[in-house]
Amino acid sequence: DIVLTQSPALAVSLGQRATISCRASQSVSISRYNLMHWYQQKPGQQPKLLIYRASNLASGIPARFSGSGSGTDFTLTINPVQADDIATYYCQQSRESPPTFGGGTKLELK
Amino acid sequence: QVQLTESGPGLVHPSETLSLTCTVSGFSLTGYSVYWVRQPSGKGLEWMGRMRYNGDTSYNSALKSRLSISRDTSKNQVFLKMNSLQTDDTGTYYCTRVTTEGFDYWGQGVMVTVSS
């Protein structure tokens, strides 16, 4: 199985940039497709798709969210961070079955 | 609009079988795959298995011996059955629609507690 590694937590100040990373144990890219997706989960809620295929903004997601990366290293950026963005963020790969998730990065306020 | 709704018992006794239903609307089960994902309380997300649009199923190898996923397309429902439940199966169970653009819609989840 492909293992996805995320830092457990990240502390940021409101209005600043948050950069959340995800590293895969092997490449999750095929040709020009980077099969990594990002989700936001707030306490008591289901996960919500933010970014698909590494850099594409899902429907209804604000433009302050962006994604980048290829191969094994991927980044979710939130700029500027707003109070509503305090949540846990998960990366997920669909390169190989089984689909796997990172352990999640909890975004906290400084 | 697209909706997925999980239903099932909130409490299951150890060694018993969990039965959950995911009822979908706004799309067809013959056009989209539906996956089950679970989340132990305070922990991360774990893929359990899938019902593909063509009726094929696939399971997490760690759960395969205990898990079964089926569907009734006429009722727009996907079913999960998992036997021999233990306390570490406690958590929230989600169904989610899957496309090439990720898991784009999720149900609100159903909390399952395994306890005597």
Image (cartoon, grey):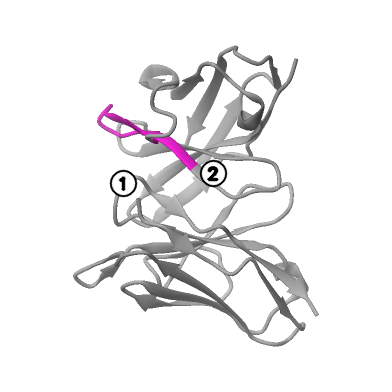
Queried whether the magenta region covers residue A58, the answer comes back as no
Q: Is residue B114 left or right of residue A27?
A: right
Along the viewing direction, whichever of B35 and A9 lies nearer the viewer: A9
The residue that disc 2 covers is: B106
Residue drawn at point x = 49 percent, y = 31 percent: B24
Q: Is residue A108 above or below residue B9?
A: below
Residue drawn at point x = 30 percent, y = 37 percent: B31
The residue that disc 1 covers is: A97
Type of the residue with mark 1: Ser
The residues colored magenta run B47-60
Quick one: SS at disc 2?
strand
Q: Residue A41: which numbered mark, if any? A: none
For residue B27, say whether it is visible. Answer: no
Give the percent coordinates (x, y) of residue A88.
65, 61
> From the image, which quarter does the C terminus of chain A lie in?
bottom right
Q: Residue furthest toward the top?
A: B16
Along the viewing direction, whichever of A105 and B72 lies nearer the viewer: A105
Give the percent coordinates (x, y) of residue A4.
45, 61
Residue drawn at point x = 70 percent, y = 87 percent: A16
Residue drawn at point x = 37 percent, y = 64 percent: A25
**Quarter of image, res B9:** top right
Give the percent coordinates (x, y) of residue A24.
39, 66
- Measure the C-alpha gap from mark 1 to mark 2: 19 Å
Q: Residues within 10 Å of mark 1 (few under 14, many from 20)?
A: few
Discs 1/2, front:
1
Q: Are marks 1 and 2 in contact (CB under 8 Å)?
A: no
Give the percent coordinates (x, y) of residue B84.
54, 16
**Quarter of image, res B62:** top left
Question: How many marks can you see?
Answer: 2
Q: Is residue A60 above or below residue B18?
A: below
Type of the residue with mark 2: Trp
